Image (spheres, helix red, strand yellow):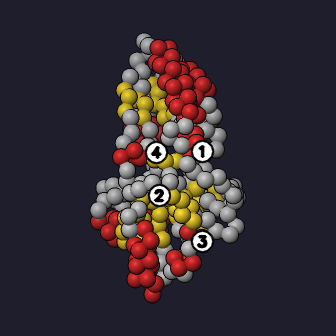
């Protein structure tokens, strides 16, 4: 709510496109806009945790460790595409004599869960292997006065029903723009004279699988959190937002979209599996 980063894909009127915010690329074509006159980080214009920490505590150095496909928000950014490299960098930084803050992110098991599902051997094997490597890291950090916090940004839920909005002529007839945000939390920009029709069609098709809110209802329920509303929230949210409460998701796309594999598991709905995350403090 306060920082404006509310989903994987958000519509930027300044680009006339939906952009994958973390990867800084067109949500449909995959194109990266390196020559844009203004970067999306500047458009959102929030102060990163790294900058906030270093401003409040000038004696602390803030590090960001993440995969190479992620954009950088810290001046001390390190790219690590495996859990092994991530742990090595954490160990090296923590063993220097400086005061450090490190935010380290790995895109698995999330990527494996999307591809193979929650019960897959691939995801289970990764988690078991990561546990061993993180335990080994904890042992190596003993005596370095390091507090280690391990958590996740979301859970996951296997998908049984995937609906492609592009193939729904009755819903498409009501829309001004392609839907945005996430498959399980989707926003729709609807023609003014088709809002009643859209509500009727949507609830008739999906009343058991998705909750449908107007933008005003969603904000009133504080489903994006509390605090001062970011100036671009009203740009990113359309007239309606649907949120999945079952094993269902929308597949968003246009006729110029790149081909992407079906996701066997995903997140951003209202199930406990997606909303509850572990918290380990070592």
State the residue in front, 83 or 234. Answer: 83
Please tell me which residue is depicted at 47% across the width and 19% down the height of the picture. 135
Q: Quadrant of residue 80?
A: top right
Please tell me which residue is depicted at 57% across the width and 51% down the height of the picture. 263
Percent coordinates x, y for residue 166 in the rendering: 60, 70
Return the residue found at the far bottom.
Answer: 193
Q: Quadrant of residue 192?
A: bottom left
Distance CA(mark 2)–CA(mark 4): 12 Å
**What residue would you read off at disc 4?**
156
- The reply to whether dot 3 and dot 1 touch (C-beta < 8 Å) is no
Closest to the camera, between mark 3 and mark 4, is 3
- The reply to whether dot 3 and dot 2 touch (C-beta < 8 Å) is no
State the residue in front, 258 or 93. Answer: 258
Residue 99 higher or lower than 71, as above or below: above
Q: Evaluate whether residue 86 shows in this view.
A: no
SS label for mark 3: helix
Tell me which numbered mark, 1 or 4, is placed earlier along the sequence.
1
Distance CA(mark 3)–CA(mark 2): 16 Å
State the residue in front, 250 or 209. Answer: 209
On residue 115, the disc is: 1
State the residue in front, 119 or 141. Answer: 119
Percent coordinates x, y for residue 68 in the rendering: 64, 40
Closest to the camera, between mark 2 and mark 4, is 2
* Few, some or many residues within 10 Å of mark 4 (<14, 14–19, 20+): many
Tell me which numbered mark, 3 or 2, is placed earlier along the sequence.
3
């Amino acid at each position: 709510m306060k920082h404006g980063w509310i989903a994987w894909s958000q519509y930027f009127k300044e680009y006339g496109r939906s952009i994958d915010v973390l990867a800084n690329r067109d949500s449909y074509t995959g194109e990266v806009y390196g020559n844009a006159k203004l970067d999306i980080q500047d458009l959102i214009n929030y102060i990163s945790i790294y900058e906030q920490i270093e401003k409040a505590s000038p004696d602390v150095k803030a590090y960001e460790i993440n995969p190479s496909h992620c954009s950088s928000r810290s001046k001390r950014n390190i790219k690590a595409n495996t859990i092994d490299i991530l742990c090595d960098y954490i160990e090296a930084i923590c063993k220097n004599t400086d005061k450090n803050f490190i935010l380290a992110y790995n895109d698995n098991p999330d990527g494996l869960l999307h591809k193979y599902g929650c019960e897959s051997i691939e995801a289970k094997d990764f988690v078991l292997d990561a546990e061993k490597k993180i335990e080994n890291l904890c042992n190596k950090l003993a005596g370095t006065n390091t507090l280690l916090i391990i958590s996740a940004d979301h859970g996951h839920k296997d998908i049984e029903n995937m609906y492609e909005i592009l193939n729904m002529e009755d819903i498409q007839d009501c829309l001004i723009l392609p839907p945005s945000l996430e498959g399980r939390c989707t926003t729709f920009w609807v023609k003014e004279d088709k809002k009643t029709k859209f509500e009727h069609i949507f609830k008739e098709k999906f009343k058991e699988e998705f909750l449908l809110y107007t933008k005003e209802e969603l904000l009133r329920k504080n489903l994006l959190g509390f605090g001062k509303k970011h100036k671009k929230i009203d740009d990113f949210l359309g007239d309606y937002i649907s949120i999945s409460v079952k094993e269902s998701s929308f597949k968003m796309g246009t006729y110029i979209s790149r081909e992407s594999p079906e996701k066997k598991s995903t997140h951003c709905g209202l199930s406990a599996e997606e909303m509850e995350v572990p918290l380990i403090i070592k």
